Image (cartoon, rainbow, N blue to C red):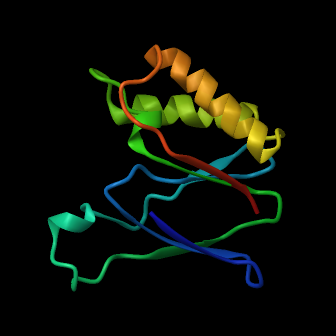
Amino acid sequence: VKAVIDTHRRHITYSSAGHPPPVLAHADGTFVLLDQATAPPLAAEPQHIARPQAALPYTPGDTLVLYTDGLIERRGEDIDTGLRRLTTILTANSQLSPDHLADTLLSRLSIVTGGGEDDIALLVARL
């Protein structure tokens, strides 16, 4: 995932190559999945092919969450179930600091997996 955050215009431009969609969580408890600019993994296509990009505005206080598939994917379960679990925990805890929110996401989602079978990378940024 590539995300460029323009703090002057309050805009995020992003692109994803084979990763699950980042989440932009608003302070009011709503969220947006950043799923409008996706492409196959980088090694699946020649490097000279342009990748799709999308942009959207954000409001100061919004939280951007980027993560790898190990956080939400479970064997025998579709990805939408994992995304719902993530967004439910995220919106219920949006008032937490980014550090505490990251810890909460990791601990609550690890309980579901029994410790996890895949590596996990997680970035939580308050905009």
Nearest to the observer: residue 62 or residue 29: 62
Vertical placement of residue 9 versus 113, above or below: below
Nearest to the observer: residue 81 or residue 70: 70
Vertical placement of residue 35 versus 70, above or below: below
Screen quadrant of the N terminus: bottom left
Q: Position of residue 26 (x, y in %)?
A: 74, 52
Image point (22%, 79%), residue name: 47
Image point (43%, 23%), residue name: 116
Image point (60%, 30%), residue name: 106
Nearest to the observer: residue 59 or residue 106: 106
Residue 48 in which image quadrant = bottom left
Q: Give the total of numbered labels.
A: 0
Vertical placement of residue 97 versus 82, above or below: below
Q: Position of residue 97 (x, y in %)?
A: 82, 43
Q: Position of residue 25 (x, y in %)?
A: 68, 50
Position of 25 with respect to 78 (left or right) is right
Q: Position of residue 124 (x, y in %)?
A: 66, 50
Vertical placement of residue 17 versus 48, above or below: above
Position of 96 with respect to 35 (left or right) is right
Screen quadrant of the C terminus: bottom right
Image point (46%, 39%), residue name: 120
